[in-house]
Amino acid sequence: MSSPSTLISARRGERVSAFVVKWGFIAVTVALILYFVITLPNFRTVDNVFGMLKFVAPTAIAGLGVALAMTVGGIDLSVGASAGFAVSVAAWTMVIGNQVGGVAVIVVLIGGLAIGGLNALLVVVARVPDLLATLTTMFVIVGLKLLIVDGKSISSNMSLADGTTAPGKFTADFLALDRGSVGPIPIPVIILAALTLLMWVLLERTRWGRALFAVGANVEAARLAGIRVQLYRTLAYMGCGLLASIAGLLLAARIGQGDVSAGNSLLLDAMAVALVGVSVLGIGRPNAWGTLLGAVLIAVMTTGFTMAGLPYYAQDFGKGIVLLVAMLFSFTLSRKRTVLTAGSTSAS
């Protein structure tokens, strides 16, 4: 039998671990912000705050898509390719197809739903493991993107294969998706806030959200409870494809051309913010606000490192280290908390 001092020490350790698990990630983010605010005067300006949020909006929106797929116990490795595909499709529709921005938006969103539907077909119907299915989809999308643009970036006044000049251009209404604002708030920030709020309401305040989490927790138990498992898994993947296409629209409006390399780096960042979101406040499951906070951390690191004059490769290293620390706070200490709780219970 354990002594009273041992029990007190175990319970104190449990409380400390629980505190660190719950607040460790946020503490890392706040510490970074304070450091950059103190050392970099330009970091604390309102314009810079909105600029950081605008910069990270595509990553955060794609991360919301990954989080949505994770709610049903899945994963989607095609989000970066889907966003890049959206960039090329939007550019082709406006520049070569000579259509207005609204048409490009509709075409891109339909394309995102189609990609999500393809993933659902492979994972839900054909029962291919999600990693293999979405990895395959990623390669298919990348190849298709290059095929429709002949392997070239699309820009206004470009020469076509028949020797003529492309008749269209990126329209002002489309470019406003990235360059417009409502008062001091950039439109990408408004879109990100709206989608985050919508995702939070869906997952935390509706029966559909509860059903999604139930499917992710235990497919068979959810099926026995009367939940239409295949439908919810399909909707999760289609929603992920839709969110990835929205991220691609913001990227296209930002760069103003159909860059064939757009979206290549989006997958890793989107996966990172979604995984970090699981760890925020010790929630232990995908969630909208945690994903947004993960994106904010990436924006703070990238902006702060750039203002400090660090080279781009140092940014990736620093990003990896901070993300690693955040993960250690949440997962390693979470396991420690479980062990301490079990030990305390057996001792009593």
Image (spheres, rainbow, N blue to C red):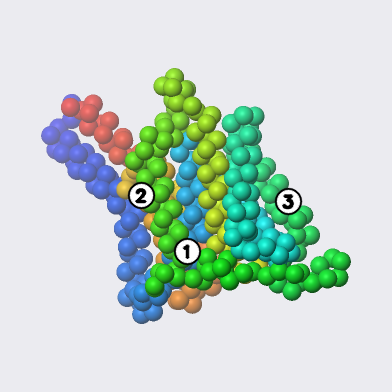
* Mark 2 or 1, closer to the camera: 1
Which corner quadrant of the image does residue 100 belong to? bottom right
Whole-number angstrom distance, CA of label 2 to CA of label 1: 24 Å
Q: Which residue carries the number 1 mark?
A: 188
Does 90 sit above or below residue 79?
below
Q: Which residue carries the number 3 mark?
A: 144
Q: Which quadrant does the N terminus fall into?
A: top left
Residue 298 location, x and y as percent? 45, 61
Q: Which residue carries the number 2 mark?
A: 280
Determine whether the residue tagged by mark 2 lies in a helix, strand or loop.
helix
Can the viewer see residue 178 in this picture?
yes
Q: Is residue 32 left or right of residue 154?
A: left
Which residue is pictured at 48% across the width and 61% down the height? 57
Whole-number angstrom distance, CA of label 3 to CA of label 1: 27 Å
Q: Residues within 10 Å of mark 1 (few under 14, many from 20)?
A: many
Does label 2 or label 3 sit earlier along the sequence?
A: 3
Residue 227 location, x and y as percent? 45, 26
Residue 274 location, x and y as percent? 46, 49
Work out whether residue 337 or residue 237 is closer to the camera in this orientation and state it: 237
Determine whether the residue tagged by mark 1 lies in a helix, strand or loop.
helix
Three-letter amino acid code at the position of disc 2: Val
Q: Is residue 74 left or right of residue 304?
A: right
Three-letter amino acid code at the position of disc 1: Pro
Work out whether residue 305 or residue 153 is closer to the camera in this orientation and state it: 153
